């Protein structure tokens, strides 16, 4: 793959054979960011899990201490008092059954996270085929199926992110924006790694955290030393 001149220059800052501390990796990602927009800093964590087995799945959520730097639009499936509570808590959209054709037939996806009360999961379940592949299906483990919609909305708006294994047993998560300070990014990254280390399934044999790469949206990857996460 042919890379642009800026990318090639940025890549020279990074020694691909070196495993950097989280703090040094964050500093390098910021330095190597050359895009004209405020890039997202991402962590890609390769695990020793085998996601084909239910007892080796990892899924959950964490509120980043400094947020994600992104405005998150929340859609809540609720009715009655819970719908009123969701509106009061700052949900961007609140509804029920009437939203199904809008999402299914009209391809309406002007939201980033979906929250639902448990009694609405029968309705939301009908959207499984369209929400599932986009990673938008509400899930109790991620705290997005709940009766406490106000707390769910507050956490999401404050910078709550979901993490889960992909098909290749890697977890991809946003850490913040390049415009964040090094300290903010390092603290967000620590919060992510703390929960992922704690989430280690007991069925995993051998090394749990295989490797970690930090990168910005358009920038080169920086490898992070995994020793402190091996536990």
Image: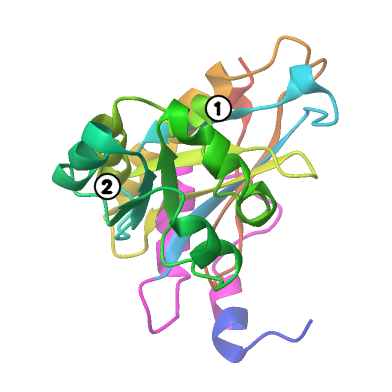
What residue is rendered at 19% in x and 41% in y? 84
> Which range is magenta?
9-38
Examine the rendered structure and indicate whether residue 151 appears above or below residue 56.
Answer: below
Residue 74 - label: none
Q: Is residue 36 magenta?
A: yes
Height in image: 78 above or below 198?
below
Earlier in the chain: of badge 2 and badge 1, it is 2
What is the residue that sits farthest to the top in this orientation?
A: 202
Q: CA distance from mark 2 to mark 1?
A: 21 Å
Disc 2: which residue: 157
Q: Secondary structure at mark 1?
A: helix
Residue 181, by quadrant, is bottom left
- Given residues 172 and 1, the one toward you in this image is 172
Any part of residue 99 in sight: yes
Q: Are marks 2 and 1 in contact (CB under 8 Å)?
A: no
Q: Position of residue 50 (x, y in %)?
A: 83, 29
Question: Which residue lies at the image location 68% right of the left edge and 84% below the top edge?
Answer: 3
- Say which residue label 1 marks: 196
What x and y, as percent, mark residue 114?
44, 47
Q: Position of residue 5 (x, y in %)?
A: 60, 90
Residue positioned most to the bottom? 5
Q: Residue at x 26, y 50 (%)?
A: 91
Considering the numbered disc 2 on the image, is that residue within a helix, a strand or a loop? helix
């Amino acid at each position: 793959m042919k890379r642009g001149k800026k990318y090639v220059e940025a890549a020279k800052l990074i020694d691909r054979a070196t495993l950097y501390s989280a703090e040094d990796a964050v500093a390098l990602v910021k330095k190597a960011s050359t895009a004209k927009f405020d890039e997202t800093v991402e962590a890609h964590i390769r695990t020793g899990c085998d996601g084909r087995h239910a007892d080796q799945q990892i899924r959950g959520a964490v509120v980043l201490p400094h947020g994600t730097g992104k405005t998150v639009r929340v859609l809540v499936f609720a009715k009655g008092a819970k719908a009123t509570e969701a509106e009061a808590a700052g949900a961007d959209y609140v509804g029920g059954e009437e939203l199904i054709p809008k999402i299914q037939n009209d391809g309406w996806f002007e939201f980033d996270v979906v929250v639902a009360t448990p009694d609405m999961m029968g309705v939301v379940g009908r959207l499984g085929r369209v929400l599932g592949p986009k990673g938008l299906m509400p899930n109790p483990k991620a705290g997005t199926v709940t009766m406490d919609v106000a707390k769910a909305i507050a956490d999401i708006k404050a910078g709550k992110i979901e993490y889960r294994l992909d098909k290749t047993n890697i977890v991809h998560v946003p850490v913040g924006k390049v415009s964040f300070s090094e300290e903010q990014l390092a603290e967000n990254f620590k919060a992510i790694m703390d929960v992922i280390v704690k989430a280690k399934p007991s069925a995993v044999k051998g090394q749990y955290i295989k490797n970690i790469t930090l990168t910005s949206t358009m920038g080169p990857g920086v490898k992070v030393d995994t020793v402190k996460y091996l536990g």
